[in-house]
């Protein structure tokens, strides 16, 4: 999943770099053809973004189920409580659980489907427990927590998926402002490109 996201981000970055160079060259050479094509691409990107936003809203419930299923399958297939055999998936999940103060996707029961975790004899991963800082070292508040989790020493009943979705909802106003700002910039860039294209003489230099 992380590799695919990286490829998508690199592709988007390359496309935006090409688009920026195209607009720069069109303005520098005062080329109506390049500026017109640049404006057309901006309109196309804006339409695709609106379409993607509409599809994301329409398929929101299905997407949430797919993400939840993917995270649970990651726990089942890859999660390892053994520090010596810790893999990137385990490190990623541990980081989320420690930072977000949660345990599993829905709760600690998600780890019961993990063969590797069941062999450890633990009830919850240490990442689900409360930590304390002692002389700059992070240690478990209750050393018995992984085998005997309670509400007083762990987040074993708090699912990470619900916690993450709540964080998104709490900061939704910021997300909306950023999206609106990007749309305004794109509309302004499109308007200016077509205005410049129209103001140039009907020949290319």
Image: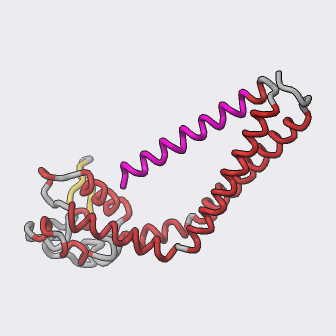
* Residue 50 image point, x, y percent: 66, 61
Q: Is residue 5 magenta?
A: yes
* Front-lying residue, 102 or 190: 190
Residue placed furthest toward the top: 205
Residue 115 sits above or below residue 99 on the image: below
Question: In the visual, does 205 lie left or right of 55?
Answer: right
* Front-lying residue, 80 or 41: 41
Question: In the visual, does 7 lie left or right of 28?
Answer: left
The residue shown at (21%, 64%) is 77
Dominant secondary structure of the residues highlighted in magenta in the image: helix
Q: What stretch is highlighted in magenta?
A: 1-25
* Residue 29 image point, x, y percent: 78, 23
**Whether residue 130 can be seen here:** no
The residue shown at (52%, 73%) is 60
Residue 176 sits above or below residue 111 on the image: above
Q: Is residue 151 magenta?
A: no
* Residue 110 image point, x, y percent: 25, 74
């Amino acid at each position: 999943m992380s590799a695919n996201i990286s490829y998508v981000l690199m592709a988007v970055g390359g496309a935006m770099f090409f688009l920026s160079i195209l607009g720069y060259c069109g303005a520098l050479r005062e080329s109506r053809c390049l500026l017109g094509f640049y404006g057309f691409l901006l309109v196309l990107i804006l339409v695709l973004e609106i379409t993607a936003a509409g599809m994301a809203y329409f398929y929101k419930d299905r997407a949430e189920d797919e993400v939840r299923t993917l995270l649970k399958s990651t726990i089942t297939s890859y999660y390892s409580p053994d520090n010596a055999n810790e893999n990137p998936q385990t490190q990623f999940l541990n980081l989320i659980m420690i930072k977000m103060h949660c345990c599993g996707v829905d709760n600690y029961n998600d780890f019961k489907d993990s063969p590797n975790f069941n062999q450890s004899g633990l009830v919850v991963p240490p990442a689900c427990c409360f930590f304390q800082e002692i002389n700059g070292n992070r240690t478990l508040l209750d050393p018995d927590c992984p085998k005997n989790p309670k509400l007083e020493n762990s987040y074993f009943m708090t699912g990470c998926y619900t916690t993450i979705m709540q964080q998104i909802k709490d900061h939704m106003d910021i997300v909306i402002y950023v999206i609106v700002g990007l749309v305004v910039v794109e509309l302004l860039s499109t308007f200016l490109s077509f205005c410049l294209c129209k103001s140039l003489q009907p020949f290319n230099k």
